[in-house]
């Protein structure tokens, strides 16, 4: 219903805006982590009692920025982050890998979702099927999310293994239903995710010791498996 010229203008990619969005997200994460760490260190030996309240807003803020990384990776999966596809995929894969996701695997899963929306072959049907379910169901889901009980489902989905369709009992295997090149890219990307997830704590341990590992667990892993799931 829109003229081609207007549609082109509305869908034009801006490398500058995308780069700003990426930089802003990363800087907020680094700033919150650094400020929290400095505050804790300033508390000395009693930090675990006097400074624990600082972790609550830090975890909430970082979880929102982890969600922002999800969104940026989603745009990259659609080739909508940067004009240059190599830059688009490199940045998208690294942003996703930082939060334990495989952008290339998600690209395959998401394509099937778009092609079979709300159908039996939709890999997202386990996520949004069967609604409305009531307020009590929502409350149970949110509690389970915040307690970290559903995180494994999220990461399994983003690594290419969505949950089974409750109506058909069939678990989708998107990587088996795609082009060989996309399948291989997804497999390679999952190795990148594994390497990044190993490299992050190792580098932090080398640079900051065991105290750095404790902060990494509290400020990165905890929000990722709890608050982020609810968001």
Image (tube, rainbow, N blue to C red):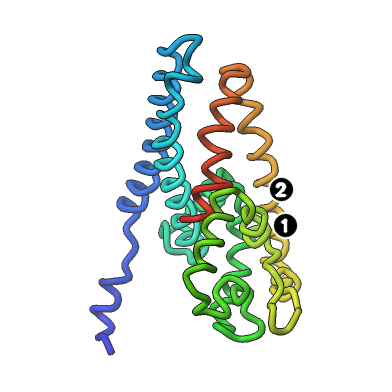
Task: Give the residue at mark 1.
Answer: 187
Judge by depth and name the residue closer to the eye, 188 or 227.
227
Q: Would residue 5 be seen by someone viewing this image from the given angle?
A: yes
Q: Quadrant of residue 39?
A: top left
Q: Which mark is residue 191?
A: 2
Q: In this orientation, which residue lies closer to the viewer: 9 or 48? A: 48
Quadrant location, the N terminus: bottom left
Mark 2 and mark 1 residues within 8 Å of each other at the beta carbon: yes
Q: What residue sits 45% from the left and 61% below the top?
A: 75
Q: Residue at x 49, y 74 (%)?
A: 134
Tell me the crowding category of disc 1: few under 14, some 14 to 19, or many 20 or more residues within 10 angstroms, Cα based: some
Q: Residues within 10 Å of mark 2 (few under 14, many from 20)?
A: few
Direction from residue 173 to residue 38 in the image, left or right? left
For the image, the number of numbered tags is 2
SS at mark 1 in the image? helix
Tell me residue 92's x, y (percent). 51, 53
């Amino acid at each position: 219903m829109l003229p081609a010229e207007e549609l082109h203008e509305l869908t034009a990619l801006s490398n500058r805006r995308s780069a700003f969005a990426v930089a802003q997200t990363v800087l907020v994460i680094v700033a919150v982590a650094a400020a929290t760490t400095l505050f804790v260190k300033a508390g000395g030996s009693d930090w675990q009692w006097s400074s624990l309240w600082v972790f609550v807003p830090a975890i909430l803020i970082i979880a929102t920025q982890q969600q922002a990384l999800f969104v940026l990776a989603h745009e990259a999966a659609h080739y909508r982050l940067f004009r240059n596809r190599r830059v688009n995929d490199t940045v998208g894969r690294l942003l996703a890998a930082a939060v334990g996701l495989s952008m290339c695997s998600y690209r395959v899963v998401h394509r099937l979702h778009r092609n079979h929306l709300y159908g039996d072959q939709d890999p997202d049907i386990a996520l949004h099927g069967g609604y409305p379910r009531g307020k009590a169901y929502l409350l149970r889901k949110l509690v389970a999310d915040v307690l970290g009980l559903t995180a494994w489902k999220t990461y399994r989905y983003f690594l290419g293994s969505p949950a089974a369709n409750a109506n058909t009992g069939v678990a989708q295997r998107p990587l088996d239903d795609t082009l060989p090149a996309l399948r291989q890219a997804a497999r390679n990307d999952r190795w990148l995710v594994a390497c990044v997830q190993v490299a992050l704590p190792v580098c932090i341990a080398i640079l900051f010791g065991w105290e750095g590992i404790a902060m990494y667990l509290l400020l990165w892993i905890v929000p990722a498996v709890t608050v982020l799931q609810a968001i």
